[in-house]
Image (tube, grey):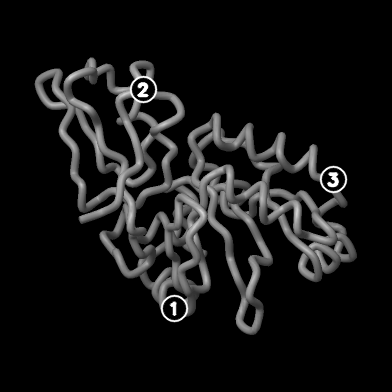
Amino acid sequence: MSEKNDWTREELEKEYVNTMTAVTIPVNIHIAGQQRILDLSEMKEILKEANLISLGTCDCRRDLKRCDAPLDVCISLNKEAEDMIKKGVAKKANLEEVLKALERSHAAGLVHIAYTFDGNEKPDVVCSCCSCCCHSMSALVRFGMPEAVIASKYVALNNLEICVNCGTCVERCQFRARRLENGKLVYDKAGCFGCGVCVSTCPTKSISLVKRN
């Protein structure tokens, strides 16, 4: 990794962007791909089906140290969980513990991403990602590499009649699709990847997930 305590574009292209696909599915819709961004409700269903779950440390945030988001929220499932526990880098966790970890990461504004390894139909690893440390989101946001994450069929839109331009959604958006200009919300629909992180904390409930046109 770069000595500057950051991912370089070359590292991302070589190690991640060209070896995985990230697809956002904010509701219970299946989209073929190796990586998916999920909302909390679907995460719960996936966890309930797992035979074994482990909780470990987020390597990206631990190594890069670019934010103070929770570290102990990296989830592995089934065979991957067994391997992580044997290696001593994660501990066995029950459903309640993992759901609490997801609640904490969601409250911190992290995006849930499920990685599915080749040959498996169900996710093996569930990460809670930030754009400053996560390899895929870092590639997209910092280097303008949309191939790192594929947008879902959904976007988060505001009801401007009740939006008070408070900026809460601007602070929450990991994809930088929202900003304030002259006190007014400016929304880049093309930059929204449908993770839904902004929806739960909108004080006026003016944001909702809708189908992308």
Which of discs 1 and 2 lies nearer the camera? The answer is 2
Q: Amino acid at mark 1?
A: Lys
Give the mark, 3 or 2, whose residue is nearer the N terminus.
3
Q: Amino acid at mark 2?
A: Lys
Which residue is pictured at 21% across the width and 53% down the height?
190
Give the mark, 1 or 2, whose residue is nearer the N terminus.
1
- Pointer 2 residue: 205
Instruction: Say which element carries label 3.
Output: loop
- Pointer 3 residue: 94
Image marks 3 and 1: residues in contact by CB distance under 8 Å: no
Q: Is residue 177 left or right of residue 60?
A: left
Instruction: Say which element carries label 1.
Output: helix
Which of discs 3 and 2 lies nearer the camera? The answer is 2
Give the mark, 3 or 1, whose residue is nearer the N terminus.
1
Q: CA distance from mark 3 to mark 2?
A: 32 Å
- Pointer 1 residue: 14
Give x and y (percent) for residue 157.
26, 38
Q: CA distance from mark 3 to mark 1?
A: 35 Å
Q: Is residue 98 above or below residue 14?
A: above
